[in-house]
Image (cartoon, rainbow, N blue to C red):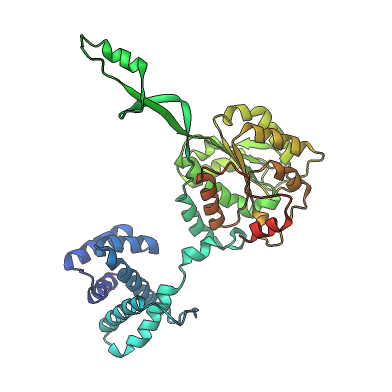
């Protein structure tokens, strides 16, 4: 790989980037530390060393993707998969691609291959990256390698929960509100002609987030990925409480506090006894309202409900418990994997009973759907309903979006 790094540095230098011997030596030392196991690590390592100006980044990106794709194809000795490329491209992009193609041709010693290399660079630059395609793919249709990549993406996710103003105050350096107690204490420190004013402001704190996640048999294709997502947000901020339910309710907040995802999920596996069983949403909500609601739903808590709504409990207990839950929190956001279908309709009894008490009804089947969840929770207007249960076309538009 030393020869590959040196040749890639030559391509960048011929493409116009100021890459000297010192940067090449730094790149070799960095590669020896981080290795070539992950493509993204190598990409950003080289970018931090070889790119010093903003306008050089496009050239570096095109050269990196074209150079390493050509090496992978030559190593595998097979043609590249066909890609659909637009016919017309902007002039500045064509100039960029020609610079990279000429640099690759000069490095290979065959200047006549510039047109073919331009097509290769064009396909490489305009083709969607693997991470972008994975973000739109259903969790249930992924391979083991793709699931591992998605777990790494989800480990970097953060919920932008907006802070809320509390009734308590904290010291402020600027003029906000006079703090009478602090001002009185400051006036007692020796004889003074003037009393120095002390200022305070209302304290802001993130509101609690309570997650109720379904682990029944109908959710088994998504439960594992949701647990990785919940582990990421639990370790990102405080006041996050996670409960799993199938036929019974289990609090796994303490298990998810461990920094290592494998250890945390192993502890969750030992703590939960009703994996991939039946679904008793009404009984689980009743137990939560009776035992946990007053402990974790204070100070404008947001409830994140992850379930398909296929309840096996008889009667209208679910509606009563959902109404009680809605009156105890700021808002309820429901994530349902069934919304991935364009023809989804709320025909199941559990779904119809839950919907009148939900503020947001969102799909949850890929990474993009979880990103939409972050935008909803991060908005200060997320207490307003985002759907109309009485309008049938609204369901189809929500499912397609």
19 up-or-down from 166: above or below: below
Q: Quadrant of the C terminus?
A: bottom right
369 up-or-down from 383: above or below: below
Q: Quadrant of the N terminus?
A: bottom left
Q: Residue furthest front?
A: 194
Percent coordinates x, y for residue 180 in the rendering: 36, 16
Instruction: Please give the count of numbered marks on the rendered protein.
Output: 0
Percent coordinates x, y for residue 317 in the rendering: 77, 36
| Residue 273 seen | yes
Looking at the image, which residue is at 20% across and 69% down? 18
Percent coordinates x, y for residue 329 in the rendering: 61, 34
User: Observer-nearest residue: 120 or 385?
Assistant: 385
21 up-or-down from 286: above or below: below
Quadrant of the rendered image containing residue 221: bottom right
- Specify whether 224 is left or right of 76: right
Looking at the image, which residue is at 20% across and 12% down? 193
Quadrant of the rendered image containing residue 186: top left
Percent coordinates x, y for residue 45 in the rendering: 31, 60
- Specify whether 366 is left or right of 113: right
Looking at the image, which residue is at 68% across and 62% down? 342
Quadrant of the rendered image containing residue 369: bottom right
| Residue 38 seen | no
Q: Residue furthest right?
A: 315
């Amino acid at each position: 790989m030393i020869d590959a790094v040196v040749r890639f540095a030559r391509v960048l230098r011929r493409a116009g980037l100021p890459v000297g011997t010192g940067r090449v030596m730094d790149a070799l030392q960095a590669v020896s530390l981080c290795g070539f196991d992950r493509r993204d690590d190598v990409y950003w390592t080289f970018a931090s060393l070889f790119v010093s100006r903003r306008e050089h980044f496009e050239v570096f990106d095109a050269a990196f993707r074209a150079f390493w794709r050509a090496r992978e194809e030559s190593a595998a000795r097979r043609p590249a998969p066909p890609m659909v490329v637009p016919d017309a491209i902007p002039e500045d992009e064509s100039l960029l691609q020609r610079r990279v193609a000429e640099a690759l041709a000069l490095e290979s010693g065959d200047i006549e291959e510039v047109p073919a290399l331009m097509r290769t660079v064009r396909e490489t630059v305009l083709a969607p990256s693997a991470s972008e395609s994975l973000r739109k793919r259903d969790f249930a249709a992924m391979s083991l390698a793709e699931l591992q990549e998605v777990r790494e993406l989800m480990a970097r996710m953060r919920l932008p929960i907006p802070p809320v103003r509390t009734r308590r105050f904290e010291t402020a350096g600027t003029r906000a509100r006079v703090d009478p107690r602090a001002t009185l204490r400051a006036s007692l420190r020796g004889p003074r002609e003037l009393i120095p004013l002390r200022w305070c402001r209302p304290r802001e704190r993130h509101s609690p987030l309570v997650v109720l996640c379904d682990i029944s048999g109908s959710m088994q294709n998504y439960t594992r990925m949701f647990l990785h997502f919940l582990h990421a947000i639990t370790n990102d901020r405080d006041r996050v409480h996670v409960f799993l339910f199938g036929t019974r309710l289990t609090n796994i907040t303490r298990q998810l506090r461990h920094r290592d995802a494998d250890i945390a999920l192993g502890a969750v596996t030992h703590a939960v006894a009703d994996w991939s069983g039946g679904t008793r949403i009404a009984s689980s909500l009743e137990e939560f309202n009776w035992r946990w609601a007053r402990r974790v739903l204070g100070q404008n808590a947001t409830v994140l409900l992850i379930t398909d709504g296929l309840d096996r409990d008889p009667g209208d207990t679910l509606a009563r418990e959902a109404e009680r839950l809605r009156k105890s929190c700021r808002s309820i956001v429901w994530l349902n994997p069934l919304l991935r279908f364009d023809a989804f309709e709320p025909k199941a009894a559990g779904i119809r009973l839950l919907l009148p008490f939900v503020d947001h009804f969102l799909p949850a089947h890929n990474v993009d759907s979880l990103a939409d969840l972050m935008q909803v929770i991060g908005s200060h207007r997320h207490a307003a309903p985002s759907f109309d249960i009485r309008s049938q076309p609204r369901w189809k538009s929500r499912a397609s979006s």
